[in-house]
């Protein structure tokens, strides 16, 4: 548990690296204690950005960790800067707000935040006209997080909450449009169970029989049965054991929650009272999304679309191998779905039998068109290989070599 973040990421790496030892049973888990003061997020953001760029503790060394938890502290990215620009422009009324102000703020939010930002120099006031203008570096994340430290505690906390809500809306919109970059998605590194369902191989144009792509269909099971839940609960019998959150449909939760939020959302019940509800959701979540389970209907499912929100069993189609050689075919299939700006998600998974696969996730509605294109290319390539073999046999040198053999 880190009581205070170091001033530099290099020192943080030195500090964290001393807790990881060779041949230990489990990798260390780091908990960063940060106060509720919004301005203190500045230190976490700087260190997180540096650690992510180095990659040693977040992506690179598989023996260290395969999580990406530090990314939620790194606001200095394209989504954070976009959200900050929307926030600043909405405060000076140059743009419409994307989200409403915090509901628990007492007073006129925009007027008081304007005053606070004027005081720290992020908003300027014209001497004669009194018109509000933004500082030239108003969308600089480092400067923003540094300057809000000079605002009153209530103001800076409310402003940062408004920024966080706007950032969440920006990310949600990017995900909705299929343009959100999640980096590399890891499956099978935690509690998920990855099973191979199908694998199809296709020869690629311009390559010999050794050059091919593979389209893997895998099923990912991430839930927790009642038997597994009771077993995990029985192991937590110490007075100092921490809270471990698991759900029947999504398994162990990685998101940290405050004790106050836990008390609002949940209530303690006896084991026999929880068993039936847990079992029902576990069984239903194999095919029914969370919307249909809790509300009785789902907008996407009602129009024949697949909704995977809250599903326990999810299916992924992963294309791996010589992907660049079929990139034109891949673009032709993906472009009508995601627009001209094609975004692909890289996945790294480990199956139950230990096989490791790295490739691109293909949306379910693109699988059939892609198979048709790859099958045509595969047949043409097989004919080309056969033709090449015939030419080699008919070539005089090849013929002499065959006779001598």
Image: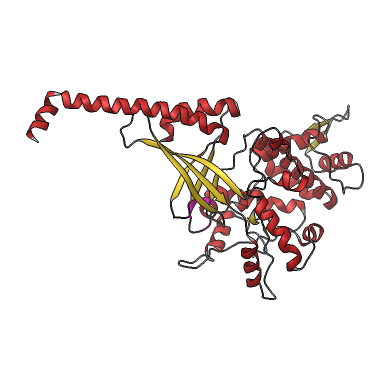
Q: On the picture, is 383 further left or further right than 172?
A: left
Up-down relation of residue 195 to residue 19 (above or below): above
Q: Quadrant of residue 111?
A: top right
Residue at 85%, 51% in the rendered image: 154
Residue at 65%, 53% in the rendered image: 283
Count of number-bearing discs = 0
Residue at 52%, 62% in the rendered image: 17
Residue 22, image x and y in percent?
46, 66
Residue 76, magenta (yes or no) = no
Q: Which of the two residues, 134 or 127, is positioned nearer the viewer here? A: 134
Residue 224, image x and y in percent?
62, 58
What secondary structure predominates along the stretch shown in magenta? loop
Q: On the picture, is 316 further left or further right than 91?
A: left
- Please report the bounds of the magenta region as a residue range: 59-65
Residue at 36%, 25% in the rendered image: 380
Residue 62, magenta (yes or no) = yes
């Amino acid at each position: 548990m880190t009581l205070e973040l170091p001033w530099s990421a290099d020192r943080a790496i030195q500090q964290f690296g001393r807790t990881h030892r060779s041949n230990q049973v489990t990798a260390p888990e780091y908990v960063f204690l940060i106060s509720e003061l919004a301005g203190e997020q500045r230190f976490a953001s700087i260190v997180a950005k540096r650690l992510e760029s180095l990659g040693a503790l977040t992506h690179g060394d598989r023996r260290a960790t395969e999580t990406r938890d530090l990314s939620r502290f790194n606001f200095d990215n394209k989504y954070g800067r976009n959200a900050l620009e929307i926030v600043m422009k909405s405060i000076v009324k140059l743009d419409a707000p994307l989200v409403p102000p915090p509901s628990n703020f007492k007073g006129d939010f925009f007027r008081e935040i304007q005053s606070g930002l004027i005081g720290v120099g992020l908003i300027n006031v014209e001497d004669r006209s009194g018109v509000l203008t933004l500082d030239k570096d108003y969308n600089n994340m480092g400067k923003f997080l540094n300057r809000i430290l000079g605002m009153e505690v209530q103001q800076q906390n409310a402003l940062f909450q408004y920024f966080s809500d706007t950032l969440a809306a920006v990310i949600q919109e990017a995900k909705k449009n299929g343009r959100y970059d999640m980096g590399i998605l890891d499956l099978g590194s935690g509690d998920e169970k990855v099973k191979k369902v199908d694998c199809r191989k296709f020869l690629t144009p311009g390559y010999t029989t050794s050059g091919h792509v593979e389209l893997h269909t895998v099923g990912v099971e991430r839930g927790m049965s009642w038997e597994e839940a009771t077993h995990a609960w029985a192991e937590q019998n110490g007075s100092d054991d921490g809270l471990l959150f698991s759900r029947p449909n999504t398994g162990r939760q990685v998101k940290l929650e405050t004790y106050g939020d836990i008390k609002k959302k949940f209530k303690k019940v006896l084991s026999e009272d929880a068993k039936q509800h847990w079992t029902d959701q576990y069984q239903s979540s194999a095919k029914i999304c969370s919307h249909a389970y809790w509300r009785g209907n789902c907008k996407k499912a009602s129009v024949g679309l697949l909704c995977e929100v809250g599903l326990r069993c999810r299916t992924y189609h992963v294309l791996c191998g010589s992907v660049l050689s079929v990139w034109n075919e891949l673009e032709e299939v993906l472009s009508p779905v995601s627009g001209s700006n094609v975004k692909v998600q890289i996945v790294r998974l480990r199956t139950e039998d230990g096989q490791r696969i790295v490739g691109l996730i293909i949306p379910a509605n693109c699988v059939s068109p892609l198979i048709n294109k790859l099958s045509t290319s595969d047949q043409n390539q097989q004919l080309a290989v056969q033709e090449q073999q015939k030419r080699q046999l008919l070539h005089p040198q090849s013929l002499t070599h065959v006779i001598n053999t």
